[in-house]
Image: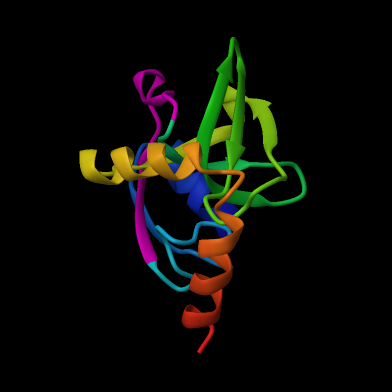
Amino acid sequence: MFSIARDILLEGSSVKVSVKGQSMLPFFRSGATVLLRPIRESDFRKYNVVMADAGRNFVIHRIIALDGEKVTLLGDGNIYGTETMSRDKVYGIIDCSRTHLFLAKLWLLIRPLRKYPLWIIRRITSK
């Protein structure tokens, strides 16, 4: 399904997709529908949420670092396990509000401690 979304984004159109899994908790729950639009060069900024080809699968994760042509992503629901790829493997972006981006910055700052609130959130959302 995400390969079809990639093709639509490459054609210049926006596409709605469903988030799968818990890797973007607490900001996006599994099953949530998000609108992706084609990414532009100016969108490559820390904290933006993008769709990318991580090699073995596609992910919708947050940019946590930029280094030249390389982009490093991390799911909000993950503590470890980043993905690094070239910019040309990033196809779409979710336009998030300023409030969302501010909260995401705080969430990233507490990365070592967030396993505790994530444990609670996962218990609540799995019911």
Q: Residue at x 30, y 38 (%)?
A: 102
Q: What are the residue bounds of the magenta stretch?
A: 33-46
Residue 111 image point, x, y percent: 56, 43
Residue closer to the observer: 91 or 32: 32
Residue 38 shown in magenta = yes
Q: Image quarter for residue 104?
A: top left
Q: Find the residue positioned furthest to the top.
A: 68
Q: Is residue 85 left or right of residue 127?
A: right
Tell me if residue 107 comes above or below residue 34 in the rendering: above
Q: Residue at x 61, y 14 (%)?
A: 69
Residue 77 image point, x, y percent: 56, 56
Q: Tell me the quadrant of the picture where the N terminus can be found.
A: bottom right
User: How many discs appear?
Assistant: 0
Tell me, yes or no, if residue 83 can be seen here: yes
Tell me, yes or no, if residue 22 can be seen here: no
Residue 14 shown in magenta = no
Residue 6 image point, x, y percent: 52, 46
Q: Residue at x 72, y 45 (%)?
A: 81
Tell me if residue 35 comes above or below residue 72 in the rendering: below
Q: Residue at x 51, y 63 (%)?
A: 117
Residue 118 image point, x, y percent: 54, 64
Tell me if residue 4 comes above or below residue 19 in the rendering: above
Q: Find the residue positioned furthest to the bottom.
A: 127
Residue closer to the observer: 113 or 39: 113
Q: Find the residue positioned furthest to the left.
A: 98
Residue closer to the observer: 46 or 52: 46
Q: Is residue 94 left or right of residue 58?
A: left
Q: Find the residue positioned furthest to the right.
A: 56
Residue closer to the observer: 52 or 12: 52
